[in-house]
């Protein structure tokens, strides 16, 4: 199988890790890359903040090579400011620039950015054009199906972005109005795929290797993007890549491996940001590692109380204790994971 190309950048695998503000920091991206994510993307960063040299924002971009191409995601609605932001980070080490045309959050769309751009295909094109003019890297776009049921604009927006020079287009197959539910509309990905020649990456609700294979089969997309389901389960990339590449499914990780990954991820978060900033974020990450475990409700409660790095060790002890206790109380069964 030929590698998927994003402009001149070759991806090691076709399942990529979707950006998630508040989650996809450097330790999280490294973990996913180590398990086979075809690329990773920064948390979204404000084009205005980059132009005004906001140091907190610039810290979000920090990246160490982790074996997979790394994209920085910009948001904004003014083509010239988006271009200036691209120029401002030209010296930083990253592989491609991604433009956010999908964020549904009120504070982003009220300013005209994120998924609000889906109402104006011409503006989408002008943004890509300006960013392209100010960066030496390939420019990608992440969009939604459209704004709402009356404005399904992904095809027009994708065409405008391609014409302006976008190297790939990821489509989350829901409108802004749908936020994150209900189920996705794979048909829109198939239609975008027909509308453009650049690679199209299908996104939305991929939780298993079977979901990924089905997404490719139904839409003809060139790659798949996984976001939420990979949290706490980086092995999902190994399973999906094996299925897409026609290899045998890898063995499932045991509980110790899962807890080791959690411990290492939180340790790296604390090293990077300090306990005060890292631990509230670690609570949200840790909860995802509890998927499918016995006593998950109680374990989630313990996750919510994480305050210091050492609390992670207590959480892990509780995880093993709960599994032992539950195993004594009920006949043995396979732990479904995730
Ligand atoms: C908490 C959270 C934060 C997100 N932040 C971003 C973001 O910063 N940029 C972006 O393009 N998409 C963002 N997304 C959307 C995801 O990348 C993805 O498109 C969406 O979750 C659907 O894919 P999934 O079903 O695999 O999770 C976010 C999603 C979640 C749940």
Image (tube, rainbow, N blue to C red):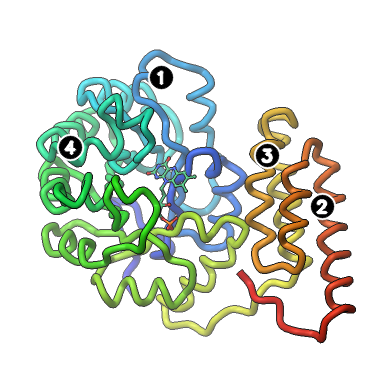
Real-space Cα separation, disc 3 to disc 1, in angstroms: 23 Å
Kindly identify which residue carries mark 4.
124
Asked whether residue 251 is in view, the answer is yes
Callouts 1 and 4 close, C-beta under 8 Å: no
Q: Secondary structure at mark 3?
A: helix
Callouts 4 and 3 close, C-beta under 8 Å: no
Residue 309 x, y percent position in the rendering: 80, 40
Q: Residue at x 78, y 36 (%)?
A: 307
Residue 275 x, y percent position in the rendering: 75, 31
Q: Earlier in the sequence, mark 4 or mark 3?
A: 4
Real-space Cα separation, disc 4 to disc 2, in angstroms: 46 Å
Name the mark nearer the viewer: 3 or 2: 2
Would you place residue 47 above or below residue 129 in this image? above
Callouts 2 and 1 close, C-beta under 8 Å: no
- Label 2, ligand 1: CB separation under 8 Å: no
Callouts 4 and 2 close, C-beta under 8 Å: no
Relative depth, front residue between 336 and 235:
336
Q: Residue at x 54, y 70 (%)?
A: 238
Kindly identify which residue carries mark 1.
49
Q: Secondary structure at mark 4?
A: helix
| Residue 193: quadrant of the picture | bottom left
Kindly identify which residue carries mark 3.
269
| Residue 249: quadrant of the picture | bottom right
Name the mark nearer the viewer: 4 or 2: 2
Kindly identify which residue carries mark 2.
315
């Amino acid at each position: 199988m030929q590698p998927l190309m994003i402009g001149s950048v070759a991806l090691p695998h076709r399942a990529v890790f979707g950006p998630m503000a508040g989650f996809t920091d450097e330790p999280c991206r490294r973990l996913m890359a180590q398990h086979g994510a075809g690329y990773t993307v920064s948390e979204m960063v404000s084009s205005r903040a980059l132009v005004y040299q906001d140091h907190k924002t610039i810290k979000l971009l920090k990246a160490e090579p982790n074996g997979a191409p790394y994209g920085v995601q910009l948001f904004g609605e003014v083509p010239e400011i988006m271009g200036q932001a691209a120029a401002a980070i030209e010296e930083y080490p990253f592989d491609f620039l991604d433009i956010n045309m999908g964020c549904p959050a009120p504070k982003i769309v009220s300013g005209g950015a994120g998924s609000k751009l889906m109402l104006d295909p011409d503006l989408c094109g002008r943004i890509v054009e300006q960013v392209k003019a100010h960066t030496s890297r390939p420019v990608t776009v992440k969009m939604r199906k459209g704004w709402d049921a009356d404005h399904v604009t992904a095809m027009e927006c994708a065409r405008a972005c391609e014409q302006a020079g976008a190297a790939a287009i990821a489509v989350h197959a829901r409108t802004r109005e749908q936020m994150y539910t209900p189920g996705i509309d794979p048909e829109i990905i198939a239609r975008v795929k027909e509308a453009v020649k650049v690679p199209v990456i299908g996104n939305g609700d991929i939780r298993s290797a079977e979901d990924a294979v089905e997404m490719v089969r139904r839409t003809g997309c060139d790659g798949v993007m996984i976001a939420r389901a990979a949290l706490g389960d980086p092995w999902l990339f190994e399973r999906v890549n094996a299925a897409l590449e026609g290899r045998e499914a890898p063995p499932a990780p045991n509980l110790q491996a899962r807890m080791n990954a959690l411990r290492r991820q939180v340790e790296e978060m604390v090293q990077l940001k300090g306990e005060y900033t890292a631990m509230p974020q670690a609570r949200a990450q840790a909860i995802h590692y509890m998927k499918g475990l016995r006593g998950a409700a109680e374990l989630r409660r313990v996750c919510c109380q994480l305050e210091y790095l050492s609390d992670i060790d207590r959480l892990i002890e509780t995880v093993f204790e709960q599994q032992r206790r539950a195993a004594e109380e009920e006949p043995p069964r396979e732990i479904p994971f995730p």
